[in-house]
Amino acid sequence: MSPTILVVDDEADMLNLLRLILRRGGWQVVTAASGSEALQLADRHPPDLILLDIMMPGLNGHEVCARLRQDARFKQTPILALTAQAHLEEQVRAHLAGIDEYIVKPVAPAELLERVRAHLHPASIETPAPA
């Protein structure tokens, strides 16, 4: 069975676009339109990777990530932030909350797929041969 990705974003158009891109990458995709919905879905069906918007009403991405990281089931789950916030302070805050990678929107579909693939299948990423 292919890995499952939980995509969390409060914008319906973005959720649909990300679902389409990630399904083309061969993964199963589950979506949540809020931080609280994301926590419920993750609890019921733990995903293999979480793609998380930071700026959301209610629980923001930092809070969602911090809560997930408190649960032993999600200590090693890759959590990638996908956000329009490019400020260094925001990136530091995200990493302190437990975000594994910070991706700034807009991002090309090929780049998004490659970054997701790198976290789901790290052994498949080519590394240069030693000289």
Image (cartoon, helix red, strand yellow):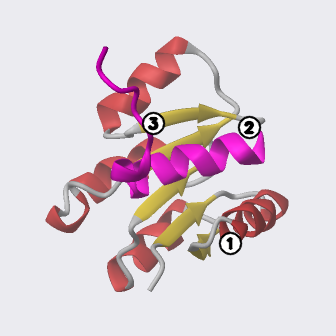
Q: Residue at x 26, y 61 (%)?
A: 74
Quarter of the figure with residue 55:
top right
**Residue segment shown in magenta:** 107-131
Kindly give the residue lying farthest to the left in the view shown: 72
Three-letter amino acid code at the position of disc 2? Val
Residue 3 image position (x, y, % from top left): 45, 74
Q: Residue at x 85, y 61 (%)?
A: 13
Residue 107 image position (x, y, % from top left): 74, 37
Near mark 1 (Cα within 10 A), the count class, few <14, some 14-19 or many ≥20, is some
Q: Which residue is mark 2?
A: 107
Q: Quadrant of the N terminus?
A: bottom left
Task: Note whether 54 is above or below 31 in the view shown.
Answer: above
Q: Main secondary structure of the magenta part?
A: helix
Label 2 or label 3, whichever comes before in sequence order? 3
Three-letter amino acid code at the position of disc 1? Arg
Q: Which label sits on residue 23? A: 1
Say which element carries label 3: strand
